[in-house]
Amino acid sequence: MRTGRQNVRFVIDDIEVTQLKDRFDLVVVVLVLEHIDWQRGLQNIHTLAPNLWYVVIQQNLVGMVDAIAPRRALNKSMRALAETARPVLAPSDQLIDFLTQLGYRLQAWDERPVPDSKTMVGLSFNRE
């Protein structure tokens, strides 16, 4: 068991074009992959040599292709986002395969249902 203080630093960065140079023990990526080239983003984060990853993605019911709920009455900002951004969900199987190829192993899969028949999926990985 460790005693004393841990060296903890929280940073926010551009996952596609990281400015970070240090190594990180843990990287947490929450609901961002659907808005970027997710393979490029994960490859960039991989250069930081994290030992652990925690990734949260959205998963829809089979046949539901839109990341933003098509049946929900959206507020003005979400409606504008849905019309212009066109987020594309990162498929969990492809994400797992990609991180496996980078030398990580899936340790845990946790799901939580959310409104609009969607599921938030938390994936924990560690370096093999």
Image: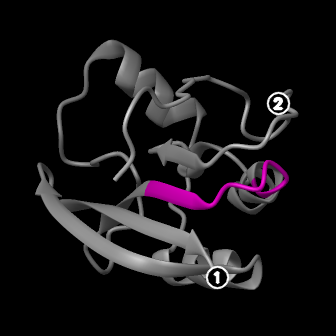
Q: Position of residue 34 (x, y in %)?
A: 55, 51
Q: Position of residue 116 (x, y in %)?
A: 15, 52
Would residue 62 be found to the left or right of residue 96 on screen? left
The C terminus is located in which quarter? bottom right
Of residue 40 and residue 44, the one placed in the foreground of this image is: 44
Tell us which disc is closer to us: 2 or 1.
1
Is residue 50 found inside the magenta-colored segment of the image? yes
Q: Amino acid at mark 2?
A: Leu
The answer to whether residue 43 of the structure is visible from this angle is: yes
Task: Measure the C-alpha gap from mark 2 to mark 1.
Answer: 23 Å
The answer to whether residue 117 of the structure is visible from this angle is: no
Q: Amino acid at mark 1?
A: Glu
Residue bearing the label numbered 2:
20
Rendered image: mark on residue 56: none
Q: Residue at x 79, y 48 (%)?
A: 48
Residue bearing the label numbered 1:
128
Q: Which residues are magenta?
A: 46-55
Q: Residue 90 lies in what quarter of the image?
A: bottom right
Is residue 47 found inside the magenta-colored segment of the image? yes
Would residue 46 be found to the left or right of residue 2 on screen? right
Q: Residue at x 25, y 27 (%)?
A: 74
Element assignment for label 1:
loop
Task: Using a 10 Å C-alpha cutoff, classify the residue at mark 2 as few (fewer than 14 neighbours), some (14 to 19) or many (20 or more).
Answer: some
Q: Is 38 rendered above or below residue 4?
A: below
